Image (cartoon, grey):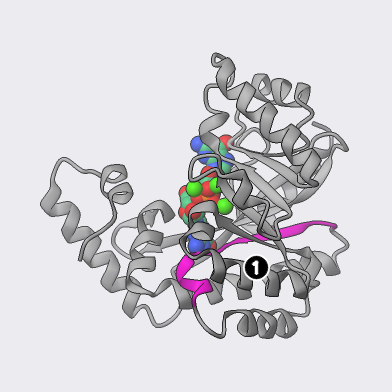
Amino acid sequence: AQLDDEVKTHYYHPDQREQSKRQLQLKNDLYYASDYQEFELFYQPIVDVREERLYGFESLLRWKHPSYGYVSPTEFIPIAEQSGRIVQIGYWVMEKACQQLKLWEDSGLEAVVSVNISYRQIIEEDFVERVKTIINHCGCHRHHLVFELTENILMKDIALSNRVLNELKAIGIRISVDDFGIGYSSLSYIKKFPIDILKIDRAFVRNLDEETNDLAIIRAIVEMSRSLNLRVVIEGVETEAQLKLLKQLRCQLIQGYLFSKPLPPKEVVKQIAGIQQH
Ligand code: C2E
Ligand code: CA
Ligand code: CA
Ligand code: CA
């Protein structure tokens, strides 16, 4: 089976044959995995740097393969999307995230939890119904849940995305546009969707210290978001220098290694204490 170009270039390996053997193996193992023992859901804090408090967590999937060890989601998610397995995995992720959210709610922690969603998931006819069932089953608050979808997903079938997003909004789930700025970036379309949050891709933050262009782009997005009443999350913030520049642009929600890497729930909570004093 053919993988898309992005995956091929990203995971190009000197030994192409070994690489495709690995991909086939991963595809099989993902497909036939009957339970989720090898999976774990990690969480990375999103910090409100203006109010100096926690805003929420992004949930990020981890797979510990019995023979390959930890496999990156950038490698196995595209494989799972291609085989369709992402649909089942996605429901598992959602269930786990909602259970964790409920635990945090009960412990008095005020935070949203965001879940990454693939295109294959939203085209399932009973997607929204199953989401409702999971939320009811876990007993978490709907308005503490954020779904992250890339702009590429939204643009694939505009009518379908719009319908699904409106149904999710009607339940109370917030919508975040992931990797914003590297796809179509058509703001006229973004305006048509019921969106709450834009997540600016790490690509714009990476060289923030040297490049003024990226700074101008972020400034423009932040200003536009204000007039459209959207929240902006900047991801991939690693240094104090980047944070300082972003604060000058009045960026409020920040995610990145500077605050914490994605971690298991108990460990990430320990990190938050540090965040409040940052
Ligand atoms: P994403 O949604 O754009 O997630 C952000 C990625 O950036 C994560 O990589 C995170 O660990 C990484 N990151 C966060 N802060 C920093 C930083 O300061 N520096 C650097 N260098 N990286 C940072 P991760 O966990 O490897 O996930 C990669 C991608 O895999 C995600 O990109 C998302 O597209 C996908 N993914 C992960 N979990 C799930 C899931 O449960 N479902 C679906 N459909 N996709 C998922
Ligand atoms: Ca994401
Ligand atoms: Ca992202
Ligand atoms: Ca991404």
Left or right for 23, reference 222: left
Percent position of residue 126, x then y: 56, 85
Residue 88 visible somewhere in the drawing? yes
Left or right for 15, reference 92: left
Percent position of residue 57, x then y: 69, 53
Residue marked by disc 1: 165
Up/down of 161 relative to 152, above or below: below
Q: Looking at numbered disc 1 in the image, what kind of residue is underneath it?
A: Leu
Left or right for 272, reference 241: right
Question: Does the closest atom of ligand 2 sit within 8 Å of the Cβ of label 1?
Answer: no
Q: Report if residue 229 lies within the magenta region.
A: no
Residue 36 visible somewhere in the drawing? no
Which is nearer the eye, 2 or 115? 2
Percent position of residue 207, x then y: 52, 22
Which residue is pictured at 14% across the width and 48% down the height?
Answer: 16
| Callout 1 secondary element | helix
Quadrant of the image containing the N terminus = bottom left
Which residue is pictured at 69% across the width and 82% down the height?
Answer: 132
Magenta-colored span: 110-123
> How many marks on residues?
1
Which residue is pictured at 48% across the width and 45% down the height?
Answer: 183
Quadrant of the image containing the C terminus = top right
Residue lying farthest to the front in this orientation = 188
Which is nearer the eye, 168 or 87? 168
Q: Quadrant of residue 23?
A: bottom left
Q: Quadrant of residue 110?
A: bottom right
Disc 1 crowd, CA 10 A, few/some/many (<14, 14-19, 20+): many
Left or right for 174, reference 93: right
Q: Report if residue 120 lies within the magenta region.
A: yes
